[in-house]
Image (cartoon, rainbow, N blue to C red):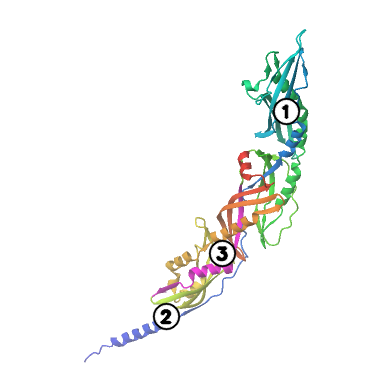
Amino acid sequence: MRRSYRGGGGGARFVVVTLVLLAACSEPVTIDVAPPVARDAATAVTLPPPPVSVVDAPIALDLRIALGALEQAVPRQFGDLERQIRHPRNARQRFAFEARREPFRVALDGDRLSISTVVAYAGRGWYDPPLLPAVSASCGTGDTRPRVRARVESQLDMTPDWRLRTKTRLTSLAPYSDTERDACRVTAFQIDVTDRVLEGVRGLLRRQLPRLDRELAAWDVRSRLARWYGLLGRPIRVTDSLWLLLRPGAVRYGGLALDDTALVADVRLFATPQLVSGAEPQLPMPPLPRFDTAQSEVGDSARILLEARIDYATASGLLRDALVGRTFSRWQRRVRIDDVRLVPVGDGRVAFGVRFSGAARGEGWLLGTPALDARTGVLTIPDLDFDVATGDVLVRGLAFLRSEATLAALRAAARIPLTGPIDELRETVERAMNRELADGVHLSATLTSARVVQVAVLADALVARAETTGAIGLGIDREVSARRVRRGSR
C-alpha cells in the first residue's frame, strides 16, 4: 500500500497565517492617549540671595564757590612801596613792599585739601644814619621779582550726619626757592624784606582761613544724598509688566578725589537689584541710612538676577523646529513626527506630546524633568521617556519606538536654548537702566555677561534664571568725569 505525503498542506497554511499577520502589522497603530494629569501647579523656584551689588555714586562739590570766597577775602595785590614801615627792632630802619599773588590752586593728597599760591614782590629799605640824610636801596623793582610760596591745608572729614567737616591751617610759607632771585635782602642796611613779606602774607591768610572753613561746611551733602537715594528706591520700568527694583541698602563713604575745581566724594551704594513682573510695585520712599565708612575697596561691580519666562506655546514652537519631520523606521515600518507640544505636569516635570503619522497615527506622550546644561546654557530633558499609557500601545505594534536608540534621538533633539532669551532680556534691562532719574542725576549700567544658573517649571511658563554681571554708576553733577573720579578714589 502506497503512503501519500501530506506535509505540503501544512506549509500552505503557515504561509497564509504569516501573510495575514503581516497584513495586520501593516495596518497603522492608532495612538489615542490622553495627556498626563497635572498635579500641583509647580514647584517653587528658589535661589540663594544674589551677591550685593555696588553702585558707584560720585557727588561733586564745586570748589569754585569756596575758592571764590577765599579769592575775594585775600587781595590779589597788597602793600605799597611808598608806605614806609618801621623795623620792629631797629628804629633807624624802615622798609616797604609791594606784592601780587597768583590765583589759588587746589590739590588733594588723601583726605587733605591743599590750596596754594605764589606771591611775587618788590621791596625797599631806608636807613637813617646819625647826623646824615636818609639813604635807601631796593630789590625786585625790575622785570624779575622774588617770590614766596604759601600753602594752606584743610583736613577733610565726613561726619555721621553727612556733613563735610574741615580744619584749615597754614602749613607752608617760604621763599619759592633758595636761589638769589627769590631773596630780597637790602644788604647795605641788613634789612631782609623777604621776612617782612612773609609776615604780611601770613597775617592775611590766617585772618581769612575761618571763612574758608565756613564755606566748605555750608555744603549740604545730606540733602543731595537723600534725594538720589530716594530716586533709586523707585521701580524702574523695563517693559509694560517687568520692573527693576534696585533695592538700595547701606551707603558708604569711600574717600575724596579732585576733578579740576570739583571736590568729589566717592559714595558707594550697596544694593540687591531684583526683577519683578506684574503691575508697578508701590514702594515707600526709603530713608537715607546712617553714615558708614567703606573699610575696603569694593569696586563698582554689579550682579543682577535675571528671570526669563518662556511660555509653553513658545517652547513648543522651538521644539517643533527641531523635531517635526523626523522619521523612525524598522522592518519597513516608518513613523513620522508631525507635531509636538509641551505642557507642565507638576513636580518639576513636563509632558511632551508627539503627534505621529505613518505606521502610527495619533498623539502619544513622553514625560521628563527639564535640566540645565550649565556649560552650554541649554535646557534639556535627559530622562525623557514614554508614559505608561503610550508605552502600552506601542508595545503591541511599534515596540522599536521604545528602544534606547529612539529615545536617545528624541532626548538629543528636545533641547531649548536659553542664552538667546537671556541675552535679549539682559539687553532690555541694560537699556532701561541707562536713563535720567532727575535733573543732574543719571543712572548708567553696563551688563557685560549673563550665566544661566537655574531652570524651573511653573504652571504658565518655563523659567530660566541667570546672573548677569557688569557695573552700575550714578552720575550726580554730570560734568564730573566718572573715569577720573574712579581713578582718583582708588
**On-image quarter of the N terminus:** bottom left
Closer to the chain start, of discs 3 and 2, is 2
Q: Amino acid at mark 3?
A: Arg
Residue mark closest to the camera, 3 vs 1: 1
The reply to whether dot 3 and dot 2 touch (C-beta < 8 Å) is no
Viewer-proximal residue among 97 and 154: 97
Query: Dot 1: what SS?
Result: strand
Q: Three-letter amino acid code at disc 2?
A: Cys
Residue 25 numbered tag? 2
Rounded to the nearest angstrom, the CA distance separating label 2 from label 1 is 104 Å
Label 2 Cα crowd, 10 Å radius (few <14 / some 14-19 / many 20+): some
List x then y, in percent, for residue 48.
61, 51
The residue pinned by badge 3 equals 349
Counting residues from the start of the chain, the first of labels 2 and 1 encountered is 2
- Residue 329 figure quarter: bottom left
Regarding residue 100, the answer to whether it shows in the image is yes
Which residue is farthest front?
133
User: Left of 119 or right of it: where is 318?
Assistant: left
